[in-house]
Amino acid sequence: MSAIQITREDVLRFHLGGKIGLHLPKPVRTQQDLCLAYTPGVAQAVKAIAAEPALAFDHTARGKLVAVVTDGTAILGLGDLGPLASIPVMEGKAVLFKSFGDVDAWPVPLANMRMGGKNTGPTDPQRVIDATLAVAPMYGGINLEDIAAPACFEIEDTLDRLLDIPVFHDDQWGTAVITLAAVQNYLLLSNRKPGDIRVVINGAGAAGIRVADMCKAAGITQIVMCDSKGPLATSRTDLNSHKRRHAVDTSAKTLSEVMRGAHVFIGVSVANALTGDDVKNMADHPAIFAMANPDPEIRPEVVAEVLRGKPYVMATGRSDFANQINNVLGFPFLFRGALDVRATTINLAMKTAAAEALADLARQPATDAVKALYPSEKLEFGPAYIIPKPFDSRLLAHVSFAVSKAAVASGAAPACDAAVLKAAFEARSKR
């Protein structure tokens, strides 16, 4: 485990003044600069864009700027605390966008003034859609964040249909992309094929639904999902349309029942949802991806004790354990790849390409620079290293380029010179 310890006071001190600010790539230092940046020169840019709107991607910040949009109804694991309380998370997201993907991002917390004037309450999908459409002209992409299910599905689907820029709900797809990469490498380690394994997903919210969607698209057909009431069985009458898509014909009533003989457990639920006996009852050489934060569905040391001497793969959502499945491995590079080819969406082909590139990078030898950051870990492909580390500088070029290629191949972006694009990504990753 990591030796890093932080206190509440440390965190609040770090956040004094916020975590983001404005960087000026074209500073104004002379009279000519002032004339170019504003009046009278700016009128020429205005007229050019008015005549050809696509030039906004070239002559403004739009082509490299992402809006991080939220209504604060599902902040981390804290729930509905409103848009104001969401700002530290949205600023943090902007920091990660820039630090890892060299993508400029800005928080857009949206007020939800309803429920008698309280700025919390159930998401009003149409309000979020309308507000996002209203601010979209400034941005080259929309990252939806911390919006409660099931409203988040309608919001993403509608905005993706109405806008000609990428729209991506990270809480839905980010975890799904990274999880699929981990599953792909588990398949290699266990010498199994997608159609051979049975997967149990605990948690049927935004992340769980999209994990199931991506796993099925990758050829994994045997999936049982559970929510707080048990398996999503076709006999249940309380399932929404998204859960019903993944309902199966089963007589099982509990998570423990469906865990018997399962090859992979994927947890996007709550702490301590899984027991040692559940793990014992899994198939030989299982994978346990316990991603509840801050406390996983089962602790790694419990799994290690239960499966002592047997092969298995363990992953969590935490940075102080091996195999951290964290969204920071996804969204910066998905948007970087999409923005650089002016993709109009982030489709399933692009998400799958990101997962495959992540899985591939974990199979390559780690660089000395990455090893130096994790001196207590053996960063060689195997059960304790199936996912790259976030600080691997190769992620930007490797994953973003794969996303760009998939965008072009799938028709989400215009054709471009792949060699030039790859060189640009490699140069950016070395900055």
Image (cartoon, helix red, strand yellow):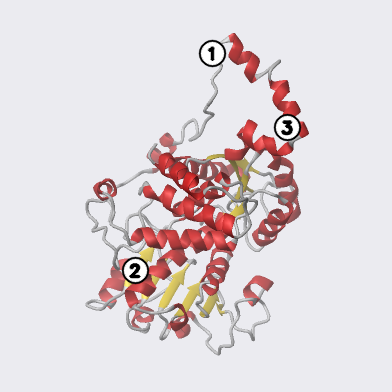
Q: Earlier in the sequence, mark 3 or mark 2?
A: 3
Q: Is residue 328 above or below residue 280?
A: above
Q: Residue at x 38, y 68 (%)?
A: 185
Callout 3: few (<14), some (14-19), or many (20+) C-alpha neighbours within 10 Å?
A: some
Residue type at mark 2? Met
Depth-wise, is mark 3 or mark 2 nearer the camera?
3
| Residue at which label 3 appears | 49
Taking the spot 54% from the left edge, 74% from the top edge, the residue there is 216
* Amino acid under disc 3: Ile
Q: CA distance from mark 1 to mark 3?
A: 26 Å
Q: Where does residue 324 sit, x and y in percent of width and height?
A: 38, 59
Q: Is residue 156 left or right of residue 13?
A: right
At mark 2, the secondary structure is: strand
Quadrant in which the N terminus appears:
bottom left
> Please, is residue 313 above or below residue 365 in the view?
below
- For badge 1, the amino acid type reads Arg
- Which label was assigned to residue 29? 1
Compared to residue 53, the image places residue 23 above or below, namely: above
Q: Earlier in the sequence, mark 1 or mark 3?
A: 1
- The answer to which image quadrant residue 346 occupies is bottom right
The x, y position of residue 253, in whole percent, is 53, 85
Q: Are marks 2 and 1 in contact (CB under 8 Å)?
A: no
Please, what secondary structure does the residue beneath circle 3 have?
A: helix
Query: Can residue 178 be seen by looking at this rendering?
Result: no
Disc 1 vs disc 3: Cβ atoms closer than 8 Å?
no
154, 50: nearer the viewer: 50
Q: Which residue is mark 2?
A: 314
Mark whose residue sits in front, 2 or 1: 1
Mark 3 and mark 2: span between their CA atoms?
A: 52 Å
User: Which mark's residue is nearer the viewer, 1 or 3?
Assistant: 3
